[in-house]
Amino acid sequence: MTENQDGSEDMVTPPTKTSCSDLLGLIMREYRDGLVSYAEKMLGDHGVAEDIVQETIIRAWRNMDRLLGMEGSVKGWLFTVTRNLIVDWVRKPHMRREVVGGTYSDPSVGADPIEELHRAMAVRPALGRLSAEHRAVLVHLYLCDRTIKETAELLGIPAGTVKSRHHNALRKLRATFPVEKAA
């Protein structure tokens, strides 16, 4: 209900199909490109930015009745949802992979096969010096590309134990392989 100037109250009409489609059209026309640009600047990846904005628009569609009746800025709501989705994306397990020594090298660039073989030959004995528990956690997390939760379930241990074994195993491997400093 809304209050008129004379103090009487009127019933607020529920959102209509037309007003919902109008607002969704406005969002797509006016805000989509700005949201994509914002997400791309935050993430550095246009494809992921498009996915994030698509999810933002889906959430706007699902909350259309709230957006039509809200007093604040629709644009502010959209950017807040986009920012929250970006934070969620960055916090996902695929973003938390720790790298053992050195820097990341893009496999699509074409790594030297001899260097890869040398690295594998150096890492294998180091993995052998880890306890079976630490080695199992690393194998599940890195070679099998499992999450902490999946690894915990498969090994029958708490997720916190997986995290601590993961951290300790990487710490031991780092001690074995000193990081090369860039020139």
Image (cartoon, helix red, strand yellow):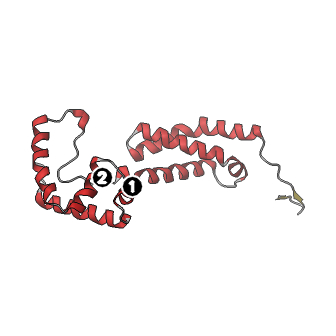
Residue at (49% x, 43% y) in the render: 52
Give the answer, above or below, for where 67 lies relative to 47. Answer: below
Residue at (11% x, 53% y) in the render: 125
| Residue 129 % position (x, y) | 13, 60
132 or 143, which is in the foreground? 132
Taking the image as shown, residue 83 lies to the left or right of residue 24, namely left
At label 2, counting other C-alpha atoms closer than 10 Å, the crowd grade (few under 14, some 14-19, many 20 or more) is: some
Q: CA distance from mark 2 to mark 1?
A: 9 Å
- The amino acid pointed to by label 2 is His
Residue at (16% x, 58% y) in the render: 173
What element does badge 2 sit on?
A: helix
Q: Looking at the rendering, which quadrant does residue 174 occupy?
A: bottom left
Disc 2 target residue: 140
Do labels 2 and 1 touch, CB within 8 Å?
yes
Disc 1 target residue: 150
If the image is split into quadrants, where does the N terminus sit? bottom right
Q: Earlier in the sequence, mark 2 or mark 1?
A: 2
What element does badge 1 sit on?
A: helix
At label 1, counting other C-alpha atoms closer than 10 Å, the crowd grade (few under 14, some 14-19, many 20 or more) is: some
- The amino acid pointed to by label 1 is Glu
On the question of residue 181 being in view, the answer is: no
| Residue 6 % position (x, y) | 90, 61
Taking the image as shown, residue 10 lies to the left or right of residue 22, namely right
Taking the image as shown, residue 78 lies to the left or right of residue 141, namely right
